[in-house]
Amino acid sequence: MSEWTKSSWQNFTALQQPKWPDQKAYQESVDTISKLPPLVFAGEIRELKKQLAKAVEGKAFLLQGGDCAEDFDNCTAPGIRETLKVILQMAVVLSYAGGKPVVKVGRMAGQYAKPRSSDTEVVDGKEISSYRGDMVNSLEPTPEARIPDPQRMLKGYYLAAATMNITRAFTRGGYAALNRVQAWNKEFVKASPMGRSYERLARNIDQALHFMEVIGLDTDTPQLNQASFFTSHEALLLGYEEALTRQDSITGKWYDCSGHMLWIGDRTRQLEGAHVEFLRGVLNPIGMKVGPKHDIKVVKQLIEKLNPENEAGRLTLITRFGAKDVEKYLPNLIREVKKEGYKVVWSCDPMHGNTYTAETGHKTRNFNDILQELQCFFEIHWAEGSIPGGVHFELTGENVTECTGGGRNILDQHLQRNYLTNCDPRLNAEQSLELAFQIAEMIRS
């Protein structure tokens, strides 16, 4: 294998890259980003890898969630706070049910670029370039707005830095205190149409917190008042990722400091592709999406290439088969990975394989399909003697109507009420919490 450098990916075919019309302006943006401070630090990345290593053994559980594609306009304190709030609430429910720590990873502070199935789309009878995320072009459906603009990468960096800043403030400044998060959960149980069915679990968590106070355990400690929280995004725009790849001053190793965890999508994980070449050399934890069209031989080769030392916590396999196909593909994948002795975190993305277009024309996902894939994921792993190590959701703290079903039984005709996503449909706060309680019951049973 040839020697890796942070720019060696440039010698390989890079799919899903924007066609930047002004190469000089693009290079100037990348050069500027390369001189700016890192967004995350090598020590934080190592800590996440350590926590994920526990998830490989079943001693921790990965909860990864956030926006499908972050929107520049939604980089606000309330927007970030509400998404963070949902993830914290879900984590408390899952950690109590599973009796193990939950590794909290947001799809945020960098999820500004999206792969697309086609370079162009037809809007109002006109063919224009596809929207590739706010870091590349604008959602506005005009030919001019869809021209890739490298200045947007720079703006993406600054907004990611702002997101990191406020996330750190919230998670370390008392907002993530355990008793506060549990109070939110109790409010949810009271307000949700399905709340009664979650009452017992919420009451049990409450009793555990009360018991700690009764026996004199100080609840005003960092362990109960703060939360460790990490960021992640798909490593898609390789020029941006290279610009934020830095050599750690302590170890001399290379880390992509654009986010703690990076993942590689189903569309860009070619064995001899630029994305795999880039990611094999940075020491971040890596996620790899695996869909129905996977070739098991190639998946094994990718695991060997991305994690040659078989290091626990380095690689997370994020399966995305859909409720109809999970039983068809997952068992064999687990058996083959187990047979080779690969140390991976198994995570389920129940969103991408369950997308359909409603009669209203909205792209959506049904709550029951999402839940069914999750149930199958857990049951198949248990049947195969494997460890279901995590879940991966597209969600928001906003009261959107983008996914059908759930306690309020959102129907196809309700989608238009508050359909806000720029790309794929997201679970709203209530649906996300319902899923957390449902997964909790699965784990406890």
Image (cartoon, grey):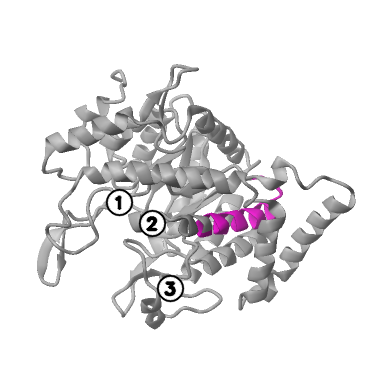
Residue denoted by label 1 = 114
Mark count: 3
**Which mark identifies residue 68?**
2
Residue at left offset 61%, top offset 75%: 192
Write down the region rendered in magenta: 82-101
Q: CA distance from mark 2 to mark 1?
A: 8 Å
**Label 2's element?**
loop
Residue 99 magenta-highlighted: yes
The furthest residue to the bottom: 413
Residue 74 magenta-highlighted: no
Residue denoted by label 3 = 401
Q: Earlier in the sequence, mark 2 or mark 3?
A: 2
Residue at left offset 71%, top offset 46%: 224
Q: State the residue in front, 329 or 64.
A: 64
Q: Quadrant of residue 235?
A: top left
Q: Earlier in the sequence, mark 3 or mark 1?
A: 1
